[in-house]
Amino acid sequence: MTSFLDLPAGTGFGLRNLPYGVFSTDGEGARVGVRLGDTVVDLAALERHGLIAAPGGGRAPVFSHGSLNDFMALGADAWAAVRGRLQDLLRADGEDALRESAEIRAEALVPLAEVTMHLPAEIGDYTDFYSSRQHATNVGTMFRGPENALMPNWLHLPVGYHGRASSVVVSGTDVTRPSGQQKPDDDAPPVFGPSKLLDIELELGFFVGTGNDLGEPIPIEEAGRHIFGFVLVNDWSARDIQKWEYVPLGPFLGKSFATSISPWVVPYAALDPFRIAGEAQDASQGNPEPLGYLRQSEPRALDVSLAVGLETEAMRAAGRPPEVVSRSNAKYLYWSPEQQLAHHTVNGCNARPGDLMASGTISGEAKGSYGSLLELTWRGTEPLAVGGETRRFLEDGDRVVLTGQASRGDLTVGFGSVSGAIRPAVGA
């Protein structure tokens, strides 16, 4: 497909992507748009002019709100209809209602440089999984030894925990270093203060579209129709706070202070060309076959390249870009998004439009593909060289930028980035 707009060469934001986001401009409030190259297409404007309408949305506007929740709730058929309509309106050889109207184009096509991005959804609940086998193996090896790296349940179900939705922030939001209890000396009482082992977690998240009624699980074969789209996630972690607090109930203050997500939601359908088999979940690879409700017949993994960039305060002052310290891929996830959602709801838990679910840290087999500083520096024993300095964990002023894109042949689907800089702890 070719757009009537001039798109940057090699853009990951062409007509095969069209990610959704919530944006505002000077003088106008937040509304829904899609990104095409370096342009934001204002769906609220197209809706006002009668060029698009979401099936099932009734007469009320769907895209003039500051969240995607209403559109997410309409379901996969409505998402497909709107996506197809947008591609038709924006193609060089498509319907000319937008292409030939200078008035509507002036209203509906907004330069990306002129917009402010917001959280794409009102997030009612946030769940973080632990779905990368290599990450779980690395962390388990550090703390329990290689013979007990994976817990007995890990290869049988997608392990997860409920996070804090209120502290999910959009890319570009600074993150304040958290304070809490730590126990650096096993033979001394705990101490209170700013985290000294502040870390990142490279993750891929998805938004639930249509949910399920309380007591009615989402079957694995239908899970894909309940997933609206994907974002990049940095689930910041205070390792020293987490280590002391997590027994016996799991992460709490060491995780709930902030989770950053990218502003553009890549539609589920946009990633169809990048679905691959993934690691076999059967005896052929020495793995147990999942129970019936988790067995997935179609390709489970997503071939999405991911990278972690780190920029120190000195680098920023000198105008130097972030240095890439890790390159990974979502294909390393053992448990798929569909399996995560099916497991999450198998007990009857109801998911709702706008709920966010994240993969957990994504790590490959090589050290340069690990998705956390905990692994990249192996608990701080092997410091990273960055910008002429070294890092074991994050220091105040450091800025982290996660990026992602899927490519095959001449097709590229971009995720953009999610970034955040570390501010000193309150009172520090």
Image (tube, rainbow, N blue to C red):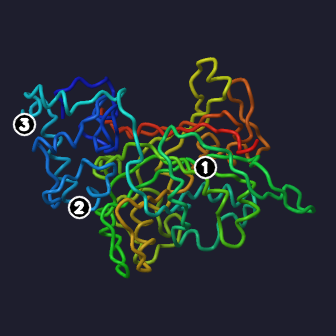
Q: How crowded is mark 1: few (under 14 residues within 10 Å), some or many (20 or more)?
A: many
Give, as a three-letter code, the residue at label 3: Glu
**Which of these two is toward me, 215 or 27?**
27
Front tag of 2 and 3: 2
Q: Which mark is residue 74?
A: 2
Tell me the CA gap for discs 3 and 1: 45 Å
Q: Mark 3 near mark 1, Cβ–Cβ under 8 Å? A: no
Q: Residue at left 36%, top 32%?
A: 115
**Which of these two is toward me, 60 or 370?**
60
**Which of these two is toward me, 259 or 338?**
259
**Mark 3, residue position:** 95
Residue furthest front in the image: 27
Quadrant housing the C terminus: top right
Say which label, 2 or 1, has the lower sequence index: 2
Give, as a three-letter code, the residue at label 1: Trp
Residue furthest top in the image: 318
**Mark 1, residue position:** 236
Tell me the CA gap for discs 2 and 3: 25 Å
Say which label, 2 or 3, has the lower sequence index: 2
